[in-house]
Image (tube, coloured by chain):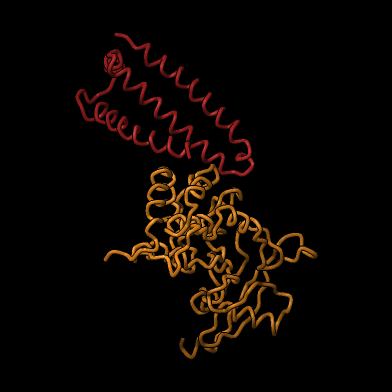
Amino acid sequence: MSNNDIQRTVTVRIQRFNPDVDKKPHMQDYQVKMWPGMTILDALHEIKTHQDGSVTYRRSCRHGICGSCAMHINGRNTLACKTPIINEVQKNDTVTIGPLPYLPVIKDMVVDRTSFWEQYLRVKPWLLPPNDIPEKEFRMSQEEVDALHDAEACIMCGACYSSCAVIGLNKKYLGPHALLKAFLRVLDPRDTAPAERLEIVSQADGVARCHTIFNCIDACPKGLNPTQAIETLRKLAQKRQKYEEARRERQKHLNEPIPS
Amino acid sequence: MLTFKIQRWSAIALLFFLTVHMIFMHYVPPFHITFDVVQARLSTPTWKIIDILFLFSVLVHAMAGSYQVITDFESAFNYRKALAWASIIIVILAFIYGAKTIWAFQL
């Protein structure tokens, strides 16, 4: 950031909506003086603290871990806390911020995530371990761990869900976030219910509804690939029985050392 | 998932039939296509069967695709069984109509 940038004042254009007062959302402009390293979330704090206390948004960790501050910034979904404002300032010195699309707005940038969590719970995103848990640890190969690593990094911010065009049309679709979690559990050798999950994702509102538009990949602030996970689930869903047999066989050896 | 599979399989069939169609219609003599040429070709049983199968693949692929796109809308998604039956009936009727036309060609 140059000295000129430090002095710069930018216009932060925020989509405002208060259901008690407004009939429909409207845009409101605020002038914010940038400082080095300022993020979009810092700008929102600045506005809320010094200019307009009624501006409403969710935030928590400020480190890109909690996923609370996912917003629609300059036409794309991302985390406000990890987006430097200098990268988003457009030619007319403006940054436009709105709530996540396709979700009902509660107030300003706060959206109702009920459908997001409902779909998430449908795939049973928790680990269902076998009854005979090993005394010390489950032994997984490096390849098995690597396959799960990407899906494990998901912070459930909702950026992928609300960028998905299918979700825009149909809230009954499981969505990229839930399918990514299903992928995580289906490929986890410790889990005992991949067949059940594959049955769930094979339904009419599951993997077959994805049109591989790739919006979820573009939106993910963690750089994950939900489309690839959905594609893998599609393949596995078509050979559920074979996959289930292989899983049972694998689980017999979970407490044994991994052959090098 | 069944519709998804049907669309994939019909796409593979289409790829084959379209290739055959393109080669024999445009890259094999006589290059100037007239009604007489088409009539002569379609009066052979082999071409009748190829074109009827081609017609079937096109109809199934188009209907599966339309069904998927229509049921993307939540309002239509709730009526997907009725829509599936309507699609099947449309495919059957269109297939009978088209197949009868192809079968009718004689020299």
Q: Relative to residue B74, is residue A258 depicted above or below?
A: below
Relative side of B44 to A247, left or right: left
Please state the horizontal and vertical placement of residue A116, each as a whole percent of the image: 61, 58
Determine which quarter of the picture holds residue A108. bottom right
Residue A181 image point, x, y percent = 50, 59
Q: Measuring 67% from the left and 61% from the top, which residue is drawn there?
A: A112
Note whether A190 is above or below B65 in the view shown.
below
Q: Nearer the viewer, residue A207 or B89?
A: A207
Q: Please, which residue is most extreme toward the top here?
A: B107
Q: Which chain corresponds to the colour orange?
A: A
- Seen at 58% across and 68% down, the residue is A71
Picture coordinates of residue B34, whole percent (x, y): 29, 19
Establish if A171 lies above or below A68.
above
Q: Residue at x 28, y 64 (%)?
A: A259
Going by the picture, which residue comes out furthest to the left?
B29
Of the pair A67 and A34, the residue shown nearer to us: A67
Front position in the image: A59 or B30 = A59
Q: Would residue A89 be visible to someone looking at this image? A: no
Q: Is residue B75 left or right of residue A257?
A: right
The red chain is B
What residue appears at the point 56 percent right and 28 percent down from the top-left corner?
Answer: B85
Q: Position of residue B6 (x, y in %)?
A: 43, 35
Q: Which quadrant holds residue A237?
A: top left
Q: Is residue B28 visible?
A: yes
Q: How many marks?
A: 0
Which quarter of the figure is the C terminus of chain A placed in? Answer: bottom left
Pick out the residue farthest to the bottom.
Answer: A3
